[in-house]
Amino acid sequence: MTKGMMAREYQNYIDGKWVGARSGRTFENRNPARYHEVIGTFPLSGKDDVDEAVGAARQAFESWRLVPAPKRGDILKRVGDLLTARKEEIARQMTREMGKVLLETRGDVQEGVDTAYYAASEGRRLFGHTVPSELPNKLNMALRVPVGVAAMITPWNFPMAIPTWKIFPALLCGNTVVFKPASDTPATAATLVEILLEAGVPPGVVNLVNGGGSEVGAALVEHPDVDLVSFTGSTQVGKRISEVAGRTLKRVSLELGGKNAQIVMEDANLELALEGVLWGAFGTTGQRCTATSRLILHEKVYDTFVPRVVRHAERLRLGDGLEAGVDVGPCINESQRRIVEEYVRIGVAEGAEVLTGGKAPEGDGLSKGWFYEPTVLGGVTPAMRVAREEIFGPVLSVIRVTSLEEAIAVANNTAYGLSSSIYTQDINRAYEAIRDIRAGITYINSPTIGAEAHMPFGGVRETGNGHREGGWTVYDFYTEWKTVYVDYSGRLQRAQIDNAEK
C-alpha cells in the first residue's frame, strides 16, 4: 500500500444497513497499475448473506412496486445529478481500481449519468396498449407490471456504466435489486449504492453483496426468490447461468463475449480507419466485449496500412491511467495478463507473426503493475484461434482478404456476434455489410466500440440470449405484460373464441 494512504474497510449493504459478511471473511482489492496499493478490503460473502439480501429485496418489493413510476423516475433523476456532481471523484477512484485511463473512466461515469436521465424519463413512458374489443361495451388493454427481485451480476471493465444499464431500468420498472459486482471493482459499486441511497432509494430496494461468483453469484442464480438474472461476462459462465436458472424458469438476460472485426476496404478513408482501429483495439487495454480484436484488410491496402498500424501502436504510452499522457493502462490482474500472454504464444505457434508488442514491458515503474504491450499479429488466417476466440486484451489480429464477400465471411467466422465495423466510401457496400454481417451492432466508418445509452446493446449467437440492454428495449426485460378486459355491458358476453361453432 502506498505510504500515507489508508485502505478503506467496505461493507455489504443489506436491508438498509451496512454490514460485514456473516462469516467475517474479507478480501483485498488492489490497483492493477501499482499492485502494492490496496484500494480497500471487502466482505467475502456467502449463501447466508445472499439469503438475507434476497429476503430484504422480496419484502421491499411489495411497497416499491406501488410507488408511481414517475416518482421512481424522480429518484433516478437525482441519481444522475449526484453522479454528475461527483464525476471526477468517481472517475479517479475507478482508474485506481481497474486501471483504464482517466479519459475513459470519465466516459464510464458519463454513461451512468446518461442512463439515469434516460431511465428517469421512461417513468412517464412505460407505455401499454389499448385496443378495440370484438364485443360491445368492453375495453381491452395491456399494462406493464414489475417482475420481482432482480439479481445483477456485473463485470469489472465498466464498473459504473454496466451496473447502471441493469439497475436503473430495473428500479424504474418497480423491481428490487440484489447487486453482486465483480470482485476486481467493488469500490465503484459501493459508491453507486451510496448515491442511490442519497437520492432516496428506500431500504431493501437495492442490496449490495460482495464476493466471488462461485459463492455469491451461484447462490443468486439458484435462489428460489430471485425472479430475474442479468449477467454480463464470459460465454462459458453465461451458459451455466442459463442452465441453472432454467430449472426454476427465471427470466435471464445474458451479455457475453465478442470477437469483433473492423473491415477496411480499398476505398476507405485510411486516416479515419487508422484512428478507429487503434481506439477500438487498445482502448480499455482491449478489455471490452466490443473491442476490435480482428482487423480485416482488403489486399490492396494491406501492405501499406499494416505498417502504419504498427508504428502508431508503438507510440502508445503505457502507464498509470491517472498520469497525463498515458494511452493504455494495465490488464485487470495477473491472471488476465497470463491469458493474453498465452494467446500470443498460441498465435505464434499457429503461424502468426508478432509485428509489435508481444510481451510485458519492463522499467519506468511498469513492472509494478499488470501491463502488456499493445500487440499486433500479422499473417493471421481465419482458422487460427487468435482469429476466432476472445482474448480480452491488447492484441489485434490482422487478416488479409480479396473482396467484400470474403471480408464479411471472415467477420462471421466466429461463434460470437456482438459488434462489427466497416470502413468504405461506397454506400452500396455499407448496406451490404449491414445486411450480411451477423452481429447485434454494426458501425459504418467508425470503430467497433462506442455504444450510446439510448440505443439497444447486445449481440447474437454465443454473445447472448437475445435480450438487449440500453435504450427502450431493456424495459421489456424488466416488466411483465398484463392483459386486462373491462366489460361494462352489465351482462355475460362470451368472446369469439367461446362462441365458435363446434
Image: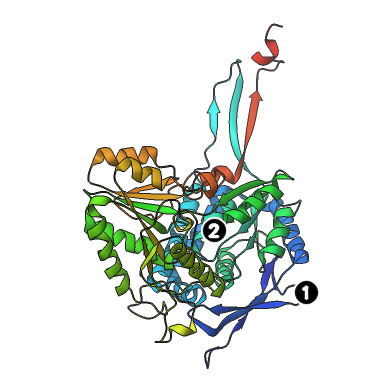
From this view, report whether residue 108 is shown above or below residue 427: below
Crowding near pointer 1: few (<14 within 10 Å), some, many (20+)? Answer: few
- 40 or 364: nearer the viewer: 364
Residue to which mark 1 is pinned = 23
From this view, report whether residue 160 is shown above or below residue 250: below
Residue to which mark 2 is pinned = 75
Place residue 75 in its image quadrant.
Answer: bottom right
Crowding near pointer 2: few (<14 within 10 Å), some, many (20+)? Answer: many
Q: x, y (%) of residue 353?
A: 37, 65
Q: x, y (%) of residue 6?
A: 57, 88
| Quadrant of the image containing the N terminus | bottom right
Place residue 104 in its image quadrant.
Answer: bottom left
For image coordinates 55% across by 55% down, the residue present is 166
Place residue 216 in its image quadrant.
Answer: bottom right
Q: Could you say which disc has been placed on residue 191 in the image?
A: none
- 209 or 266: nearer the viewer: 266
Q: x, y (%) of residue 50?
A: 73, 62
Q: Earlier in the sequence, mark 2 or mark 1?
A: 1
- 307 or 22: nearer the viewer: 307
Q: x, y (%) of residue 399?
A: 35, 54
For image coordinates 23% across by 56% down, the residue present is 270
Question: Which secondary structure lies at badge 1?
Answer: loop
From this view, report whether residue 309 is shown above or below residue 446: below
In the picture, measured across the screen, residue 403 lies left or right of residue 392, that is left
In the picture, measured across the screen, residue 481 lies left or right of residue 224, that is left
Amino acid on which the number 1 mark rests in the picture: Ser
| Quadrant of the image containing the C terminus | top right
From this view, report whether residue 345 is shown above or below residue 412: below
